Amino acid sequence: MLVLSRQRDESIIINDNVVVTIVDIRGDKVRLGIEAPQEVPVHRREVYEAIQRENRRAAQLAPQDTEALRRESKG
Amino acid sequence: MLSRMMRIDTVRFGCVDVRTQDVIVFPLGIPGLENCRRWVLLTPPDGSTVHWLQCVDQPETALAVVNPRHFLPTYQARMSRRELDCLELRTADETRVLVTVNRTERGLALNLKAPLVINRNRRLGRQMISNSDLPVQYLLEENVAEARRKTA
């Protein structure tokens, strides 16, 4: 992994179109500002991974698993 | 316009004929299913609330999806304008919001955190990850039953 030291208000540039700026540093919390083209998704990693896991599992669902919802909609 | 039909192979529903114009493209794929870009929304004939987003290119890949407002009439998810822009949405009418259904040890759950937003006219879709503090697994039985008790 490439490791760079930066101070507040300094940035790094990735590929010529993604800029990550250190906006604020408070204790062990760092606030980052990210400028990227709209087609480049930017997410908190743990949230993104939770969504990936959820989608992979959801794609295993069988129609009979949703029976309860069908009853729900008729009731 | 002459609509061309295409036949897609599915594990759950056998061979299904759909109109080529009904294909919805998710240009980024869906997180965890990144290779699945072309999908069709299959609507059950029985008027059920559950629809299936079937991957055109992988017969085994399909997601059960529902309109979250059917269960949570006040559902709202804040999303970044930046991410919505690529769907080229102009009106509320052409916007369709669906959430996936999953099975958990405690019953069925909806992913309220990451709604699938579709532009019905442009046939473009993207799974948004909302900025709102919403659960990835919203347990239906516990929560909806609870909500009904409160309003009853």
Image (tube, rainbow, N blue to C red):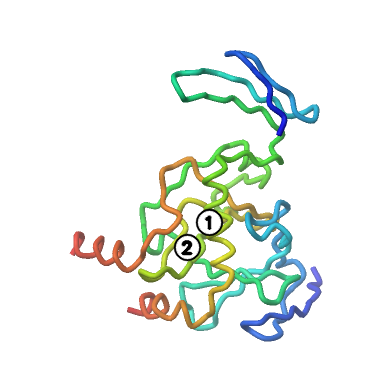
The residue identified by callout 2 is: B67
Task: Point out the tag, 1 or 2, that comes first from the N-terminus.
Answer: 2
Between marks 1 and 2, how big is the CA–CA gap?
A: 6 Å
The residue identified by callout 1 is: B97
Q: Quadrant of residue B43?
A: bottom right
Q: Position of residue A45 (x, y in %)?
A: 57, 42
Kind of residue sitting beneath label 1: Val
* On screen, residue A7 above or below A31: above
Q: Residue at x 36, y 76 (%)?
A: A72
- Residues A63 and B33: in front is B33
In contact (CB < 8 Å): disc 1 and disc 2: yes
Q: Residue at x 54, y 70 (%)?
A: B64
Helix, strand or loop for disc 1: strand
Q: What chain does mark 2 sit on? A: B
Left or right: residue B120 compared with residue B107: right
Q: Position of residue B133 (x, y in %)?
A: 41, 43
* On screen, residue B152 above or below B13: above
